[in-house]
Image: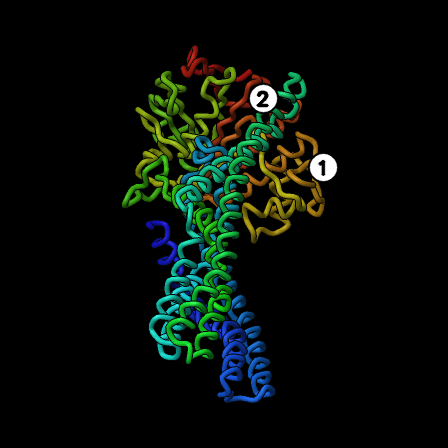
Amino acid sequence: MTDLRWLLAFAAPARAVLAVSALARILGHAASAATLALPAGAIGASLVGSAVLPVTGVVAVLVVLAVASGVLRYLEQLTGHLAAFRLLGELRIWVMERVLPQAPAVTDAGGAARVLDVAVRDVDRIEVFFAHTIAPAISAVLLPIAAIGLTTATAGVPTALALAVVLAAGWVIPFLGRRRDRETARALGRTRGDITQHVADSLRVREVILGAGTVAERLAGLRELDDRLGAALRARSRRAGVRHGATALWIWGGALLVLVVGLSAAPSALPAVLMAAALVPGIATGLDTLERLAVSLPGGLEATRRVRELAGAAPLVAEPTSPTVLPAPSPHGTAPAGDPRTPAAELADVTFRYPGRPAPVLDVVSLHLAPGRVVGVTGPTGSGKSTIARLLQRHRDPETGSVSLRGVNVLRLGSAQVRRTVAVVDQEPFLLDATVAENLRLAAPSATDAALHEVLHMACSPLPLERRIGPRGNALSGGERQRLALARTLLRASRAPGGIAGSVLVLDEATSHQDPLTQERVVAGVQSAGASTVVIAHRPEALRGADHVIHLEDGQVVGGPQPPT
């Protein structure tokens, strides 16, 4: 019920459009029910010799009712879906506004594919509530009440009571097994997310799987997940089949019951009794949605729960209530070059461990980045190099120690100011299936062609702006992709207060696909822009040109600062 109330509150801005949809549905289904009840009443009237309308008149009224039913049905669908699509758009924005502050840490725990499944597919599944739940639920209450009232006035209380019992059964049948449906919806949501993540992980490490000869094991895991999904779907389908059969039995058995009770209690009111019996299949067209909702609504509510759970998760870093304003950089950078008193960035005795890992990944590590200088960080895999990049971006906060920019602790700055100052380029950057210029302008949509050429030159990339690079940049070599990503990061850094010279650049294995000479040229190009730079690399050759280098092993600095190789 909490999720249901939340959805109703979220739908409040579209209340007027949804009201039009509900009204159109009520009138449309009333007209549809009348197309069955009117002929039944006319036949009864002719049998007792009290016909009010001639046959041509009845036919004319039926034509009008049929046309009205079709027009109102169209209006219901149009307004209902207009409201639903508008609300889904607002919901996507609402989700993104709450997920972005959690990124990228949100994908560490749940997996990127699972997060995508919730943020995209589960949001789409909620459409069933906005477009196919509110109006049907209202009409399923009002139409039976109107039918019972009409029957009471025309056929008497006994017939009306029989009709009330039959219509009440029409409400009960669709919700038989509702608890099992909710459990199945939850299991389906989890299993679909697991399948999505399994496929994404398999594609990401496909070369490892092929090389190790473990394709059969990965396929067996996927088959197990698929069997679990199939079992849940079959169980849901069996319950839906039982409900569908019970509904068919209810319609004709209910009509017969009303007819028998009505003829026994008021044989003289044959036209009204026949109309009451005809109202059972007539109103059934308005209640049939309840049967579909019994299948789709639990899935929609489960999707709502998952979306709210994702969006409501607390970010891993706490934002200050009153952020400190980052001091403005000097005209030549963040401070006079090499001034140790006001470092561009600094880690002071930082200790950090990931959840679930007993040993710290960084253990009392310090790093001092002077303005306009280059610090190299090297070490084996798992030594904590990339964690330094995450701490500088404030994706996470240290357990002990401090991280600061221009002498101000990032805890006091807030993530927004940190993002404007610290720019990171990763080893495997994400690139769009678009042109070089379009990929660059992700960082600065209004950048001129001259600005794009400038950052490409600094990144030692000769790519033409109009060249298309394919999905994820697969039309480029690994080195070209990295240099293009570096150019985009430089463009983003140019928007920092004070420009590139006022930014902190972090190159996290960002030149791993370059030859040593190109690596040296790339670092020199970055240095020429005046940026304060941290270069993270496995290979010492990538750190040529660094002012000093620190070496990490098991989360600790080994041997102190080292001269560049």
Residue at figure coordinates x 32%, y 25% from the top left: 399
Graded by Cα atoms within 10 Å as few (under 14), some (14 to 19) or many (20 or more), the crowding at tag 1 reads some
Residue at the extreme left: 321
Residue at figure coordinates x 56%, y 36% from the top left: 230
- The relative height of residue 538 versus residue 374 in the rendered view (above or below) is above
Residue 402 in the image, given as x and y percentages of width and height = 32, 28
Q: Residue tagged by mark 1?
A: 475
Residue at the extreme top: 559
Residue 564 vs residue 381, the one in the foreground: 381
Which amino acid is tagged 2? Ala
Which numbered disc flags the more N-terminal residue, 2 or 1?
1
Marking on residue 372: none
Graded by Cα atoms within 10 Å as few (under 14), some (14 to 19) or many (20 or more), the crowding at tag 2 reads many
- The relative height of residue 2 versus residue 77 in the rendered view (above or below) is above
Q: Secondary structure at mark 1?
A: loop
Residue 424 in the image, given as x and y percentages of width and height = 50, 34
Residue at figure coordinates x 49%, y 88% from the top left: 50
Residue 314 picture quarter: top left
Q: Is residue 532 left or right of residue 55?
A: left
Which amino acid is tagged 1? Ala
Residue 557 vs residue 241, the one in the foreground: 241
Q: Secondary structure at mark 2?
A: helix
Residue 447 in the image, given as x and y percentages of width and height = 58, 51
- Residue 531 visible in the current orientation: no
- The relative height of residue 12 versus residue 374 in the rendered view (above or below) is below
Q: How many marks?
A: 2
Residue at figure coordinates x 60%, y 87% from the top left: 56
Marking on residue 542: 2
Between the C-alphas of marks 2 and 1, the distance is: 25 Å
Q: Is residue 129 left or right of residue 455?
A: left
